[in-house]
Image (cartoon, helix red, strand yellow):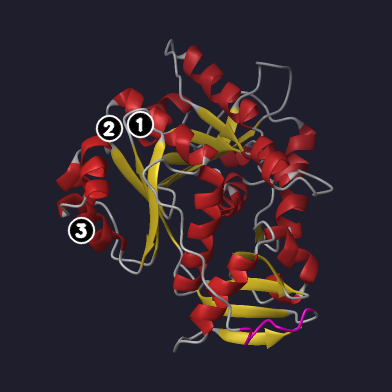
Amino acid sequence: MYVILDIETTGGQFNQEGITEVAMYKFDGHKVIDQFISLVNPERPIQPFVIKLTGINNAMLRSAPKFYEVAKRIIEITQDSIIVAHNASFDYRILRMEFSRLGYDFRRETLCTVELSKKLLPEQNSYSLGKLVRSLGIPMSDRHRASGDAQATVKLFKLLLSKDSDKQILKSLIKSEIKTGLSPKLLDIVENLPNKIGIYYIHNEKGELIYLGKSRNIKKKVNSLFTNESKIAKKIQTEVYTVTFEETGSFLIASVKEYEELKQNKPPLNRIPKKIKSSKKFFSDQNKSMLLIDKGRTIEERSVILVENGVLKGYAFFDLNYQITNIEVLKNILVTVEEDKQHLMITESFLQKKNSVKQIRI
């Protein structure tokens, strides 16, 4: 579980700042399940440049709760969660400082979306939140207010999760949950899985990925693995500690994603995927460039695969048409895949069957 956080402060000398506004969104890796947003009376004046930047002034905060009045709620919403923030060292330092004034040692694991973005989005010109989300076509409102910045960070983090093909972010979460002993066993694991299209990841007690697969119904597929008598299924049942998943909405995206992540992660209980032969029907023209549009993970979202000059470049999820009509923005949000003819073979095989994929030549 993650808590995406943004804090606004009074400004001032290091470790003398006070919180003026806090926004927290509890995120299970797929959707926001809880939130806490509040102005906070910092009991000290706000620096003039901060007032100009955020629009929050001293008069607005006179009747706002003081930090000790919201501290319990902050502890509750962040319990057993990793704190995620853009420049996490700042927000985490401010939180720890406020709690230390109350005599409480506040400690949580953290992830920084600046550091993650530098790793997973290496071509960006700037990693400031405003410029970064603009280059990704992510809508943003109330810039420099806690709620607006935190909502943008939620969308950014969701994109970073999809780009994390080697599952380093996911592994850090699993290790965190193992430390706290949160993971249940087989029946409870299945109960918490969705009846949705996507990829499922089976982890052992060390948090290591031992098996992954795609399915049109994740819950049904994992349940069959837990009740099957095959040799592989028996090994999975013996070694499984927890199961995570990623919804894709599109079975085509799930198929491409499964093949790419099997190559990257090489889970020990997976067999080498069978090669699919080409019909040479759709991508025989090396100059062929097109977008393949399909369903997304939610009603508002859609998915896209980019084929450029006869090569499948990757896939993405988008909310706004601007994100795919602007090719630079599309390439920024794209989860890239290694050039491999099998990606085209998988796609050709899928397109030959009845499906809802829309093909747009570019």
Quarter of the rendering occupied by the N terminus:
top left
As displayed, is residue 19 above or below residue 259? above
Amino acid found under the numbered disc labelled 1? Glu
Predominant SS of the magenta segment: loop
Q: Position of residue 101 (x, y in %)?
A: 50, 13
As displayed, is residue 43 above or below residue 150? above
Pointer 1 with pointer 3, Cβ within 8 A: no
Element marked by disc 2: loop
Q: Which mark is residue 177?
A: 1
Pointer 1 with pointer 2, Cβ within 8 A: yes
Labels 1 and 2: the sequence-earlier one:
1
Tell me if mark 2 has few (under 14), some (14-19) or many (20+) residues whose alpha carbon lies within 10 angstroms of its own. Answer: few
Distance CA(mark 1)–CA(mark 2)? 5 Å
Tell me if mark 1 has few (under 14), some (14-19) or many (20+) residues whose alpha carbon lies within 10 angstroms of its own. Answer: some
Tell me if mark 3 has few (under 14), some (14-19) or many (20+) residues whose alpha carbon lies within 10 angstroms of its own. Answer: few
Q: Which mark is residue 182?
A: 2
Nearer to me, 194 or 59? 194
Element marked by disc 3: helix
Q: Which residue in the structure is indicated by mark 3? A: 224
Amino acid found under the numbered disc labelled 3? Ser
Labels 2 and 3: the sequence-earlier one:
2
> Residue 71, can we see it?
yes
Nearer to me, 75 or 229? 229
Q: Is residue 87 magenta?
A: no
Distance CA(mark 1)–CA(mark 3)? 25 Å
- Residue at 27 percent of width and 47 percent of height: 232
In magenta, the rendered stretch is 280-286
Distance CA(mark 2)–CA(mark 3)? 23 Å
Q: Position of residue 95 (x, y in %)?
A: 53, 25
